[in-house]
Image (tube, grey):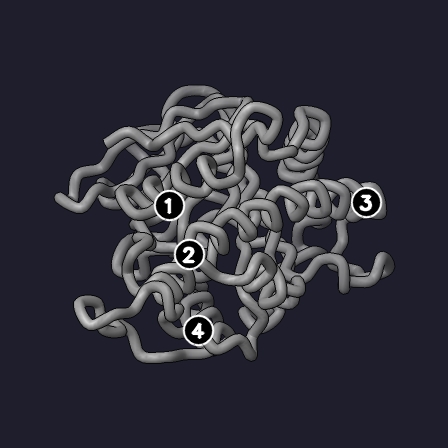
Amino acid sequence: MDVPLIDCDQGTRGDGDIARDIDAALSNTGFMALTNLGLGADARDAIFSLSRRFFASPGELKARCAYGAAADNFGYQGLLEESLDPTRPADLKETFTMRNLLKVADGDPRWPDEEFREVAAHFYARTMDAARRLQRLLALALHMPADYFVERHSGENITLRLLHYPPVAADGVDTEQMGAGAHTDYGMLTLLVQDDVGGLQVQSADGAWHGVPPRDDAIVINSGDMLERWSNGRYRSTPHRVLPVAGARDRYSVALFLDPDSATRVEALPSCVDEAHPPRFAPTTAGQHLLERIEATHLG
């Protein structure tokens, strides 16, 4: 299964054509790689430099920035502190998670330092520009008002996450242990930039796992649980995982989880329901779904 590559250059393609390609990709695989979405190499380079610096910092600093509770969804988590597949051994990764980061004051002790906050906020703002454009393209594909999704994502649950997968010896890993266990994402969309090490895999409908080759000119996008519900199953919330890192190189990636505001009622959109396609999911609120999913993955 190949992850479709879609060019979003508005100078050469109309929004209607781009929206149709996005609709096909999310309907068939739930994953796609988008180029020319507006996230430049400067922002990407800065966030990866920040990530490498933070994860190489002393344990005392990481402990000061420690993750508190799922309701906050903010701070540092070390190796084996999260299990995205709760039925499998804990994940071989460390993370720094930043929910609603623009609302976290610059003097908050969970920030490693002021430079960290500034670089993260800049990358967040640039990535959100890309995300809002993508939301409007999806609204076009689903015959909804242009800002339908934008208005339901004020930032309350939108989360930026730095991820570090250190290399591990093959004889030190449980055969069922992953860098990130198999899971679906919880919200509307995830925007991912990854380095050149690789390891991300997506699961096709037949249960097979397929690698997603990294590209430095593309953002990997996948639909999450909320978009699957909004689209009445038209768009797949596709299981994916990250393999443990073999060899000598560390793997870094950065994800923006575009999750709706907590009070948002999520149910099948009118354009996705008809006599042949009755609603497949009971209505829910985004907040309840997100909290239940996050709490299930955090150990201890």
Circle 4 — which element?
A: strand
Q: Nearer the viewer, residue 197 or 245?
A: 197
Which mark lies nearer to you, 4 or 3?
Answer: 4
Cα separation, mark 1 vs mark 4, equals: 19 Å
Q: Are marks 1 and 4 in contact (CB under 8 Å)?
A: no
Looking at the rendered structure, the secondary structure element under dot 3 is helix
Q: Which residue is mark 3?
A: 118
The residue pinned by badge 1 equals 23
Kind of residue sitting beneath label 1 = Asp
Image quarter where the C terminus lies is bottom left
Kindly report the distance in space between the C-alpha atoms of the residues bearing marks 4 and 3: 33 Å
Q: Earlier in the sequence, mark 1 or mark 3?
A: 1
Q: Identify the amino acid type marked 4.
A: Val
- CA distance for labels 1 and 3: 35 Å
Q: Label 1, label 2: how many angstroms apart (C-alpha)?
A: 8 Å
- Residue at the (60%, 56%) spot, across then down: 159
Q: Nearer the viewer, mark 1 or mark 3?
A: 1
Q: Point out which mark residue 142 bears.
A: 2
Query: Where is residue 168 drawn, in percent x and y?
Result: 40, 31
Query: In this rendering, which labeled residue sits more in front, label 1 or label 4?
Result: 1
The three-letter amino acid code for the residue at tag 2 is Leu
Residue sitting at x 26%, y 43%: 28
On residue 148, the disc is: none
- Residue 56 visible at all: no
The residue wearing badge 4 is 266
Please report contact status of discs 1 and 2: CB closer than 8 Å, yes or no. Answer: yes
